[in-house]
């Protein structure tokens, strides 16, 4: 604190919200050099002891003072941008659409294949009776007449894995179709499900990561985890636990068979699909061979028919999920209720033209929840599988940009606008409210008395004079197009900053 000897007065300025260096800049930018050099000496005092501050460090990054560039949007910059985006996006969309259309794909919705009645002369359904596949159940890159697709259902008496002397009846779906072109490798086989919400919150979390890695997680830990209700049954831990593993897709697709192979002595030729390499490398890292003993675990409830008496045995041990890539693909949950998952692939052989038959073991129930299931055979392009949405999206954006560019160009040529034209300011616009309230000086004059008479320690003439200078400076810094609404801003500013002026003689 330094006193002015001529007037025996001291001026103390205290700022609550500003950092010291910022407040000095603010204060000294208000008063001219003659005022602060000849009349008053100023210092900043703290009204309370310093406390640990939680405000960010005084760096350019944390205080948002990094250098930035904001271009001025003028017709010379905006209009070329529209045309450049359109010229780039439209051809790129055409390329994406071409790549998508070059993919050959066949999709059969076999949901209601098992609902087809058996032939009248075969009530047991042991002899397949083929009928044309409904057109709404086929989606392909070829015409329906080229495919000539038919299907039939047949009953298979399959021996049980754990007891060949026993059999069970299973409805199988047979699909025959004509392949009009050669499918060059790689060729992929997918299954597609609809209305199956793998992205449900409880479903997504329903597994135990440590158990999948092979660790022998205790029953108490499994019960305390997210596997409910597929956690522990009859004091035995379900392995693998959780809803995802329990609902594993269990339809079986047998390899397509080329019937009456042309140019070959063999009557039929099988086109094999392999499950090796269908899982992501990141998926494989999540799984390991289990360390449980057989007496500690049991299969999931929907797996019990695969094992004798619904239990794991030495002859039929639990699956090695570290090597079961179809299981790993299923455990990678889909984000949408309509999804497809890879079943197998063939990266070596060409799928020749001809009449093919695919047999599907129909086990996975979908009609109970209103879903569908489909078999998909597809190739890929240099951009991936068949997906026309991205190509059309690029084309639409490109066309819209070109159209907007043309419209804005015509508007600019018809009625150009000068950059920085002050006639568009609110106080120069006849359509706006006229009068001194619309200008910074008019706003200051109209509200000066209200601000000076506001409750506070500002009572003396000298203090009012100082406030007068402060207000003039603050109002002049307000953006001119927003001055009409600044009374509330100024009141808030001074109530927050608490600039107190104490004059002691």
Image (tube, rainbow, N blue to C red):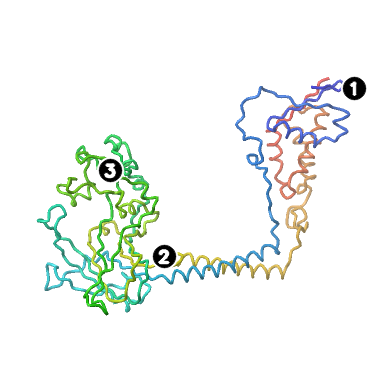
Q: Are marks 2 and 3 in contact (CB under 8 Å)?
A: no
Q: Which mark is residue 487?
A: none
For label 1, the crowd category at 10 Å Cα-Cα, with few meaning under 14, some 14 to 19 and many 20 or more, is few
Q: Helix or strand or loop: what does disc 1 sit on?
A: loop
| Left-right relation of 132 to 14 | left
Residue shown at 78% from the left, 41% from the top: 444
Q: Is residue 227 above or below residue 11?
A: below
Residue shown at 55% from the left, 65% from the top: 397
Identify the residue position indicated by label 2 in the image. Answer: 385
User: Which mark is first along the chain, 3 or 2?
Assistant: 3
| Left-right relation of 456 to 504 | left
Q: Helix or strand or loop: what does disc 3 sit on?
A: loop
Quarter of image, res 82: bottom right
Q: Helix or strand or loop: what does disc 2 sit on?
A: loop
**How far, Cα to Cα, is label 3 from label 1?**
92 Å
Q: Is residue 429 above or below residue 37?
A: below
User: Which mark is first along the chain, 1 or 3?
Assistant: 1
Q: Quadrant of the C terminus?
A: top right
User: Which mark is first along the chain, 2 or 1?
Assistant: 1
Identify the residue position indicated by label 3 in the image. Answer: 290
Identify the residue position indicated by label 1 in the image. Answer: 6
Along the line of sight, the residue nearer the viewer: 263 or 415: 263
For label 3, the crowd category at 10 Å Cα-Cα, with few meaning under 14, some 14 to 19 and many 20 or more, is many
Nearer the viewer's eye, disc 1 or disc 2?
2
Q: Is residue 505 above or below residue 410?
A: above
């Amino acid at each position: 604190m330094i006193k002015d000897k001529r007037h025996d007065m001291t001026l103390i300025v205290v700022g609550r919200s500003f950092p010291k260096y910022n407040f000095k800049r603010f204060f000294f930018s208000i008063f001219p050099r003659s005022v602060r050099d000849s009349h008053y000496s100023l210092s900043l005092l703290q009204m309370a002891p310093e406390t640990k501050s939680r405000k960010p460090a005084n760096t350019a990054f944390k205080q948002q003072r990094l250098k930035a560039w904001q271009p001025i949007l003028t017709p010379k910059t905006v209009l070329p941008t529209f045309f450049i985006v359109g010229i780039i996006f439209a051809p790129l969309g055409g390329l994406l659409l071409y790549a998508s259309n070059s993919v050959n794909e066949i999709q059969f919705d076999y949901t209601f294949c098992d609902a087809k009645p058996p032939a009248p002369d075969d009530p047991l359904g042991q002899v397949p009776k083929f009928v044309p596949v409904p057109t709404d159940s086929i989606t392909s890159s070829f015409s329906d007449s080229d495919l000539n697709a038919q299907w039939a259902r047949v009953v298979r008496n399959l021996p049980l894995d754990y007891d060949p002397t026993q059999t069970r009846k299973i409805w199988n779906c047979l699909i025959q179709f004509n392949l009009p072109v050669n499918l060059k490798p790689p060729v992929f086989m997918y299954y597609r499900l609809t209305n199956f919400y793998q992205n449900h919150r409880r479903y997504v979390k329903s597994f135990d990561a440590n158990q999948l890695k092979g660790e022998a997680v205790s029953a108490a830990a499994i019960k305390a985890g997210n596997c409910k209700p597929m956690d522990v049954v009859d004091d035995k831990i379900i392995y693998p636990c959780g809803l995802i593993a329990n609902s594993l897709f269990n339809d079986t697709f047998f390899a397509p068979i080329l019937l009456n192979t042309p140019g070959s002595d063999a009557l039929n030729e099988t086109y094999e699909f392999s499950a090796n390499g269908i899982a992501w490398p990141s998926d494989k890292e999540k799984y390991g061979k289990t360390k449980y003993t057989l007496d500690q675990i049991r299969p999931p409830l929907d797996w019990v028919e695969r094992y004798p008496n619904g239990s794991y045995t030495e002859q039929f041990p639990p699956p090695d999920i570290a090597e079961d890539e179809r299981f790993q693909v299923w455990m990678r949950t889909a984000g949408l209720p309509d999804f497809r998952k890879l079943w197998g692939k063939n990266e070596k052989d060409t799928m020749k033209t001809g009449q093919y038959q695919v047999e599907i073991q129909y086990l996975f129930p979908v009609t109970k929840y209103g879903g569908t299931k489909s078999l998909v055979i597809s190739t890929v392009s240099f951009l991936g599988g068949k997906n026309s949405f991205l190509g059309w999206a690029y084309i639409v954006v490109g066309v819209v940009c070109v159209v907007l560019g043309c419209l804005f160009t015509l508007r600019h040529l018809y009625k150009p606008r000068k950059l920085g034209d002050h006639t568009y300011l609110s106080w120069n616009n006849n359509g706006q409210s006229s009068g001194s309230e619309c200008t910074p000086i008019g706003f200051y004059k109209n509200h000066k008395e209200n601000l000076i008479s506001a409750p506070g320690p500002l009572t003396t003439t000298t203090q009012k004079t100082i406030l007068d200078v402060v207000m003039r400076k603050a109002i002049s810094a307000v953006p001119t197009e927003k001055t009409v609404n600044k009374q509330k801003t100024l009141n808030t500013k001074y109530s927050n900053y608490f600039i107190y002026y104490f004059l002691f003689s």
